[in-house]
Image (tube, rainbow, N blue to C red):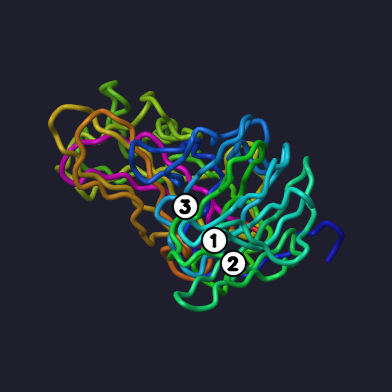
Amino acid sequence: MSAGEEVEPPPLTSQTIMTCSMECGLLSAGGNNAHFTGVNAAISISTATKRTGNRALRAYMPTSQTAIARCFSVTPNPTVIRVYLYFQTLPSADTLLVWQQGCNGGLVYRTATQTVHGGGRTTSILSSGTGIAVTTGQWYQVDLKISWVFSGTRTVDGQINGTPLTQSVNQMSGTSPALVTLGSFASVTGEWFFDDLVISNGGADYPIGAGRVIAFTPTLDGNHNITGSGQFEKTTSGIYVTNPTNDAYTYVNKVPLPTSVTSYIRGVSGSFPSDYFEVLFGIVAGFPTPLYPRSLDAWSSWGDTGGSINPRFKVDLNDNGNIGNVLNIASLVGTSLFASPTHFALPPSGGNWGISGGNGNINNLRFRHSVQTQQGTFHAGMLEIETG
């Protein structure tokens, strides 16, 4: 192996549950399933300080306060986490930086020694070992495994840049684990950032290890299958997507995902539920070329055209002819924009993700958009792909 050559990491298991690069740009999604929920005022998305791509999660406490960014609906046990952490200014007091709500086990910062440790909180913050020193101005790779057993041994295993931390044993509370949380458990001052997050509930995935989460957006049209007329309208132009159309992707290629209505494709009728328009994904500008993809989240942004019609429409991920469902809306009324991610630990075709060939090839992934019964609007699609 030559100097600087990247080493292929082992594939992740089918138990990964979240892959996030913050590129969606959303801290909430119309009350739907954004990656984060319960976000307080200290949390924002940064475009200035980031590790990969164009965005990172920022925790900024100019006055003493907590910082809470809870990951949506993530309650595994054991919990395996990989995230990158960057300090602009160090915390002013002892705190947890990455932890699991409920049991409060995770990564502890100690201000007296400026070190991080495996640990948790019961009635006070506890930690094990001498820890690993941290400073400002550089990214740290954080790997954690939080294991909680009722009336049994509760442990936190961790690594910083691949160097093991002392295992924390029985230093978390007796409350069962809930949502993975980034930020600061205690009220402190300071500023730090998180990027390239992956979460798994497979103990075999620990440590997830080095990697980046790459963003893909629609860059070309795929193979449309439209038999009826007037099925998919380009916004409200009166111009419709047909089989020869080659610019449908330009209406749904927004990164970050939209927070206001601009261009979209309107699914007009459900008279032909087998019809669909298809877009092909490619890498977003500013990201390195992915080499070893290991899991992904597929985002869809959608809405309603208003009025009293309940749209029923869906978005599918096409993996070399193998279909995985991303979005299947049963009913929706109103003009709000919504967005949600669907996680694919493994390709719909089975096996492992790759960058060439047929099945599992991330460079040949497509979204198929169809209307099953009634109208709705397709605003954007995006992939966030963990790659070694």
- Describe the element under mark 3 as helix, strand or loop: strand
CB within 8 Å, label 3 to label 1: no
Q: Which mark is residue 171?
A: 2
Choose top left, top right, bottom left or bottom right for residue 124.
bottom right
Considering every residue shown, the one lying at the far front of the view is 123
Residue 278: x and y, percent?
A: 37, 44
Magenta stretch bounds: 358-386
| 354 sits to left or right of 249 | right
Q: Specify whether residue 372 is painted magenta.
A: yes
The three-letter amino acid code for the residue at tag 2 is Gln
- The image shows residue 209, relative to residue 217, as above or below, that is below
Tell whether label 2 touches label 1 (CB within 8 Å): yes
- Image location (x, y in percent) of residue 44: 54, 34
Q: Residue at x 42, y 32 (%)?
A: 247
For disc 2, the neighbor class at 10 Å (few under 14, some 14 to 19, many from 20) is many
Identify the residue under disc 1.
122
Q: Are marks 3 and 2 in contact (CB under 8 Å)?
A: no
Q: Of the residues tagged 3 and 1, which is closer to the observer?
A: 1
Label 1 sits on a secondary structure element that is: loop
Q: CA distance from mark 3 to mark 1?
A: 34 Å
Residue at 18% x, 45% y is: 272
Check disc 3 and report the residue beneath it: 297
Number of disc labels: 3
* Residue situated in front as seen by the camera: 25 or 58: 58
> Residue pushed farthest bottom?
152
Q: Rounded to the nearest whole Å, what is the CA distance between mark 3 and mark 2? A: 33 Å
Look at label 1 and name its amino acid: Thr
Percent position (x, y) of residue 22? 54, 42
User: Quadrant location of residue 350?
Assistant: bottom left
